[in-house]
Amino acid sequence: MSDAFDARALLIVDRDMEGRLVRKELVVLAATVLLAIALILWHR
Amino acid sequence: MKTTFTVLRPQLWCAHAGRQRSQRLRRFRHGLVELAVKAFLFERSPNAKLALNCGASFGAQEYLPVMALLADGVAIAFFSMVLIGMTPMIASFGQFLLVGLHARRNHYDRCADYTPRVAFILPAWNEADVIGASIDALMSISYPAGFWRIFVVDDASTDDTPSIMRAKIAQYPGSVVHLRREVGGQGKAYTLNHGLKAVLSDEWAEAVMIMDADVLFEPLTLRRMTRHLADPAVGAVTAYVKEGSEPGNLITRSIAFEYITAQAASRRAQNVVGVLACLAGGAQLHSRANLLAIGGAIDTSTLAEDTGTTFKTQLHERKAVFEGSAIVWAEEPDTLAGLWRQRMRWARGNLQVTAAYRHIWFRSQRFPGLRGYFFGTIWFSVVLMPLFTILRSIGLIGLYVMHSPLALAGFETLWGGALVLFLFETSFALAIDPATARRAWLPGLLYPGMISLAFMVLACVPVSRLVALGALTEPLGAADPLHATLNLMIFGWGIIAIGAGWGIYRLEKAGCPAIVRDLLLALFGYGSVIAAVSMAAMVEHWRKVEIPWYKTVKTGKARILR
C-alpha cells in the first residue's frame, strides 16, 4: 500500500544526512590525528 | 646400537635436565616469593631496581639474572594488563571510526515505499501520567489512514490508566484497543506477550511495533522504519530513542549524551558490520514473519527482553537494522536511584543473555554476525566494562609498586590515549546530533569527570615536566606517605572512580542535596556511576541474587524537542 507521501524524497534527505556525517567525521578525525601528532612531538 | 643410543641418550639427558630444572624451579619459586614479599611489603628501595634488591637481599648473586628476568616478566605482565584493560576504549574507538562508513554500507538501497498495517503494543502499568500523550502522538503520525492501531496492554493498573483508556477509545474509535490483564506486575515481557497473543491471533497486523508507554513518536518515524521491512531479509528495525525530559537535569542530560554514543554512533557502526546488539525496547518494529519465526512471544527468561529478542531475530537469519533518522522521545530517570534500578535491570539482563547464548561467542573469525570476533569484543567490552577498568588499574599499581619504568609509560599510554579518544568521540558525538549537543554538550564534556580529565591532561605533559613536578616518578619507598598515597590513588584511579560512583548513589539515597550530588558527578563523572552499577550487577549475578522487576517511573516530562 502506498499513499501520496513522497517516500523517495524522505530517503534522499536521510541519505544526505548520512553523507554529512562522513564529512564531519573526517574533519574531527583529522583534527584528532593532528592533536595526537602534536602531543607526540611535544613529548619528544 | 645406534638405535639404543638414540633412545637412551635422550633419557639420560632428560634425567639430568630434570634435576637441573627442579633446582632452577626451586630457586625460581624462592625468588618469586621473595619478590612478592618485597613488592607487597613496600620495601624502601629508592636507588635500586626491585629485582636487584630481591636478589641481593638473600645474598645470592647468581640469582640476579633470574630475578631481573622475573621482574621484567612481571612488569610486562602488568603492562599487558593495562593494554588489555584498554579494550573497551579501543572497541569504542573502532565503532566510532565505522560510523562514517554508514553512508556507504547501509540498508537504504533495499528500502522501498512500504506501509504495512502496524499494530503498536504499549505495555502499561500505572501509566496514567504518560499514556494519553503517547496515544495522541501516535494518532498524529504521517501514515496511511487506517493502517495502524494502538493496543494498550494494561498490566492490572491501579491508577487512572483504565479511565484514560476509555476516553482515548472514545476519542479515536477503531484505532485504540484496551487489553487488560487482571493479574500484573510480572514484568514487561509478560505484558507484551499478552498483547502479542491478541495481535497475532488475527491476520490484520503485518508488522508489530513494540514500545514503551511513555515514548513519543515523531510524525515520520514509522515511515522511516517500515521502509526497511520492504526487504524480506529484515526481521526488525529499531529507532533512535532520545532523552526528552523537560525540564531536565545533569542526569537526564548525561543520558541524552550517552544515547548519542550508545545509539546514534554505535548502532550505525553495527549496521555497517551487519549485526545489532540491541533493538531499543522503546521502539522496535518487527515484521509479522519475524515474530512468528521467533515463537510469537518475547523471551521471559531475561530482564533484557529487548536484547533477547534482538539475538533471536538475528540467530533466525533475519537482519536487525538501526534507523538513525527515525526518532522517538522518552523520559529517562532524573535521579541516581532511578538510574541505578534501570541500569541494574539492563546489566543483569545482559549477563543473563551472555550466559544463555554462551555457545555463540567468538565462534567465527569471519566478519559479520553475533558469532564474530567484532561483535564479541564490543559485547564483552560493555558487559565486563568495570572488570577491564579494574584490570588496567591493577596493572598500573603493580608497575608503580615495582618502580618499573613502565609505570609512567603505562600511565601515559592509558590516559594520553584516553584524552585523544575522548576528544575524538565527544566531538564527533556532538556533531552527529547537533540538536542534543546544544542541550547536553556540558554533561558530554563532564562524562568522565573532571578528575579523570585532569589525569588525561597530566598524562600528556612530557616526562621531564613530571619529574620537575615531582609527580608519579618518585618510587613508592622514597615517597613520603602522603605523596605515596596520592600516587597510588592516581595509578589506581579506575578502581576509586567505580567506588566513588557507588558512593554518590548511596549519598543521594541518604538524602544528599541535588547540588552536592551534581557537584560530585561533575568531579567523578557520570561514567563512574554506570561502571559502578555494572560492577554491582556482576556481583549480584555471581551471588545469584534474585532481582524483582523494576519499572522505571515515568511522570510525563518527555517532550518532542527539536
Image: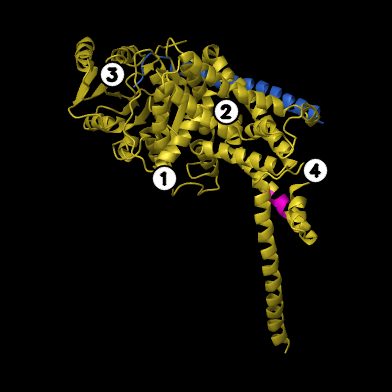
Chain colours: A blue, B yellow
Q: As shown in the figure, which amino acid type bears the numbered disc 1?
A: Ala
Q: Position of residue B331 (x, y in %)?
A: 39, 17
Relative placement, left or right, of B483 versus B118 is: right
Mark closest to the chain's N terminus, 2 or 3: 2
Which one is in front, B463 or B223?
Answer: B463
Please tell me whether mark 4 sits on a helix, a strand or a loop. Answer: loop
Which mark is in front, 1 or 4? 4
Give the chain letter at badge 4.
B
Q: Quadrant of residue B496?
A: top right
Would you call the spot at circle 3 few (<14 residues within 10 Å), some (14-19), or many (20 or more)?
many
Tell me if label 4 and label 2 are in contact, CB under 8 Å: no
Which one is in front, B147 or A2?
Answer: B147
Label 2 sits on residue: B99
Mark closest to the chain's N terminus, 3 or 4: 4
Mark 1 to mark 4: distance in Å? 50 Å
Tell me if label 3 and label 1 are in contact, CB under 8 Å: no
